[in-house]
Image: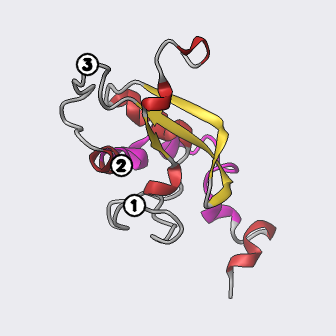
Amino acid sequence: MMDGGVPNIKKWVVLYPVYINSKKTIAEGRRISVEKACENPTCVEIGDCCSHLKLPFAIEIDKAYPRDFMQVGRVRVLLKREDGSLSNPAIRSRKQLMLHVAELVPRHPGRTKKQEPASTSNAATSKSGKGGKKKR
């Protein structure tokens, strides 16, 4: 789906995990309220939520968030088709997409089972050496 360039994903909506991360501030790039945001979402989780919402999506692993380029990966989502019709009539805007995805991520099967604890949840790793800088 990604190579070949049949769907022009350049025109798709970009969704960085930072946008819906409750651990980030507005200045760091969060775009929805903390109450509605979810903790440290990953591209894979966002992608799975998009497929659950029946939205075409493409995960771009090689891309990083400009404000925090350690946040690697972003998800392209097709909200409107070429003819202007909505992929999912329930989701009309980027904001609604973010709210829907943020609502679904905590219920993601990977969350309940915790199959990849090291890469995503820095809540667990912050006690070890990695998150030492955050404490002031």
Question: Residue at point 45% right, 62% down?
Answer: 30
Quarter-wise, where is residue 42 in the image? top right
Of labels 1 and 3, earlier in sequence is 1
Image position, residue 7 (x, y; %): 46, 17
Residue corresponding to mark 3:
83
Assess whether mark 2 and mark 1 are in contact (beta carbons under 8 angstroms).
yes
Question: Residue at point 35% right, 27% down?
Answer: 55
The correct choice, above or below, for 64 with respect to 129 in the image is above
Q: Amino acid at mark 3?
A: Asp
Highlighted range, magenta: 100-125
Residue corresponding to mark 2:
98
- Depth check, front residue: 81 or 87: 81
For the residues carrying marks 3 and 2, which lies nearer the camera in this image?
3
Q: CA distance from mark 3 to mark 2?
A: 23 Å
Question: Residue at point 61% right, 64% down?
Answer: 123
Q: CA distance from mark 1 to mark 3?
A: 28 Å
Assess whether mark 3 and mark 1 are in contact (beta carbons under 8 angstroms).
no
